[in-house]
Image (tube, rainbow, N blue to C red):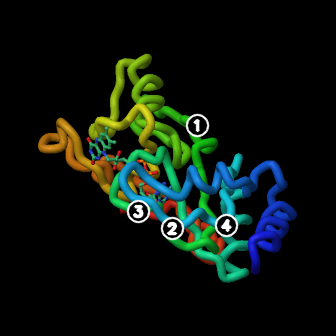
Amino acid sequence: MNQNEIVAALSAAIGAEQVLHDDTSRAHFSHDLFHSGLPPACVVVPRTPEDVVDAVRVATTAGHPVVPRGGGMSYTGGYVANDDKAVMFDLRRLDRVLEIDEVNRFVTVEADCTWAKLHEALAAKGLRTPYWGPLSGKKATIGGTLSQNSVFFGSVRHGSAAESVLSVDVVLADGACASRLGW
Ligand SMILES: Cc1cc2nc3c(=O)[nH]c(=O)nc-3n(C[C@H](O)[C@H](O)[C@H](O)COP(=O)(O)OP(=O)(O)OC[C@H]3O[C@@H](n4cnc5c(N)ncnc54)[C@H](O)[C@@H]3O)c2cc1C
């Protein structure tokens, strides 16, 4: 599809207000801290996981690559698409702490909850996660950090980000949702 067509298809699926295609937004999402690429065709800003599923399905069925972006705090080109057909997913609206289970000692968060937000929610209860986020954790998200499996002070004792995770829900490239992949 050309740019107008993919914007129209995504807007029909999840609502036009969740599909950015102005030049300023596309330019902003074309680079990380150190690397620049081509502006993506558009940027999806989903409000719910279901929106992610629907938008991924629309984009990949039409042959467009999809690229997730969290807090945008990485500098290794991971989310720099360098493809003007790419559909970028800015996931920062999916930032809720869904559950803190104090008895069984686990938390459930949306993918783009920041480490700072989780830390504050747990500190209010006198708790913390073993891995407690990277130095960039005021902006960096749990989804982005898991993708890169980051480490920080305390990792010698508590391990990397992934070692504090029990399971994840994953949206696959065809828009299917694989739930609760555990390890
Ligand atoms: C000042 C500063 C301090 C830093 N400190 C540390 C540190 O202490 N330790 C460390 O390891 N790193 C550090 N970093 C690097 C970086 O901030 C971390 O790797 C951080 O975890 C990136 O998280 P993010 O949410 O910003 O991800 P992004 O930069 O947005 O994305 C990172 C990668 O994850 C992918 N991604 C994002 N969200 C998702 C998702 N929901 N699902 C699947 N894939 C996704 C992206 O496509 C990209 O490939 C630092 C960077 C800066 C600028």
- Element type where label 4 sits in the image: loop
Disc number lying in front (1 or 3): 3
- Is 85 on the left or on the right of 69, as rendered? right
Q: Which residue is mark 3?
A: 78
- Element type where label 2 sits in the image: loop
Q: Which residue is mark 1?
A: 96
Q: Tag 2: residue type?
A: Ala
Residue 45 in the image, given as x and y percentages of width and height: 68, 50
Q: Is the CB–ligand 1 distance for label 4 below 8 Å? A: no
Q: Tag 3: residue type?
A: Gly
- Is 46 on the left or on the right of 111, as rendered? right
The reply to whether dot 4 and dot 1 touch (C-beta < 8 Å) is: no
**Between 170 and 116, the one nearer to me in the picture:** 116
- What residue is rendered at 47% in x and 33% in y? 101
First along the sequence among labels 4 and 2 = 4
- Is 158 on the left or on the right of 106, as rendered? left
Q: Is residue 82 above or below residue 16?
A: below
Q: Is the CB–ligand 1 distance for label 3 below 8 Å? A: yes
Residue 75 in the image, given as x and y percentages of width and height: 35, 53
First along the sequence among labels 4 and 1 = 4
Marks 4 and 1, how far apart at CA: 28 Å
Marks 1 and 3, how far apart at CA: 24 Å
- What residue is rendered at 52% in x and 49% in y? 111
Marks 4 and 3, how far apart at CA: 17 Å
Q: Quadrant of the C terminus?
A: bottom left
